[in-house]
Amino acid sequence: MMAVGLAAEAPPHWNALPAQPALVPLGVPDGPQVAIWQGAANPNKPYIAQLFAPGDKPVPLLDDSPPDHFHHHALMFAIGVDGTDFWAEKDLKNAGRQEVAESILTTTGDCVTQRLRWLATDGTRLLDETRVVRVRATGKGAEAVHWLDWESTISPAAGRESVKLFGSHYFGLGMRFLPAWANKVTFLWADSAGQKVVSGDEKVTPGAWGAARCEIDGRPVTVLMIDHPANSRAAKWFTMGTPFCYLSAALGLDTQPATLAKGERWTLRYGLAVVSGPADAARLTKLADEWKTATPFPTKDNPTPAKP
């Protein structure tokens, strides 16, 4: 493995940080490119800048910092911590920053590990995160699948006795799709029982998985997000199809904020499967079961449930 960056201690404000090169392709050795990793905070957080559907000509799926919501960064993870909003950015006075302390990329280019410091606007260190992202590709033709495995382990920063986690109904691991998905997307869920309409076509749906399906360049593309059953907080799938398309593994922090005490942690593991071709609920359930059986994560420890 090779280190690709080590940041210094954070200065008080995010805009005082030096620029860092960051865009790195993630893919399978001698195989397809699956994603692009934005490894440095841009401007307030690192994230996955692009995700590609499989095929002879890979199709990009995600939108990074669109004009209507410039804080939407393709595939990103953010929540609120101790009164600081890490989802929004320059439009809020209390916006937080995820500073990169260390990044390690495998020599094969298919897995990245990061240590992140979550900083308040004044530079106060609130939360520490270890993030692991890995990509894979399986199958061929209509059976081809691009996989992205995401693991975030968060805990109170050194010196803090506890942190309170909060957020809107869409806070969590979320993705903003390109404009071609707007008003055309179909959402699917493992189970629509318990689904709640928030506003307009915004819905929050508990369950094992959520998916977005659309026809892009004349072919069907489906993006499946899978919740790991051992996660510290079960996902509630936030979906929105108009005026733009968004899918998020939300954490229900709007109705159930949580507290992490010193020495406690949350572990959140998700799988993404991108399919070019037919993908009904039966196939998506099968893919979700295959992902959970594969246990793709390097760490095996049990997460610590947070206190409500």
Image (cartoon, rainbow, N blue to C red):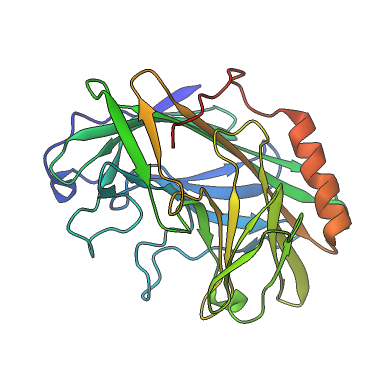
Is there any visible trace of residue 72 in the rendered image? yes
| Residue 178 x, y percent position in the rendering | 54, 71
Question: Residue at point 17% right, 35% down?
Answer: 124
Residue 55 seen in the current view: no
Along the line of sight, the residue nearer the viewer: 301 or 140: 301
Between residue 211 and residue 171, name the one nearer to us: 171
Does residue 188 appear left or right of residue 175 in this picture?
right
Quadrant assignment for the C terminus? top left
Using the image as rendered, state which of residue 174 and residue 138 is in the foreground. Answer: 174
Q: Residue at x 76, y 56 (%)?
A: 191
Q: Position of residue 221 (x, y in %)?
A: 73, 65
For residue 213, side relative to residue 252 (left or right): right
Front-most of residues 107 and 301: 301
Looking at the image, residue 95 lies above or below residue 115: below
Residue 157 screen position, x and y as percent: 29, 26
Q: How many marks?
A: 0
Residue 192, image x, y percentages: 73, 61
Q: Is residue 193 left or right of residue 240?
A: right
- Taking the image as shown, residue 149 lies to the left or right of residue 91, namely right
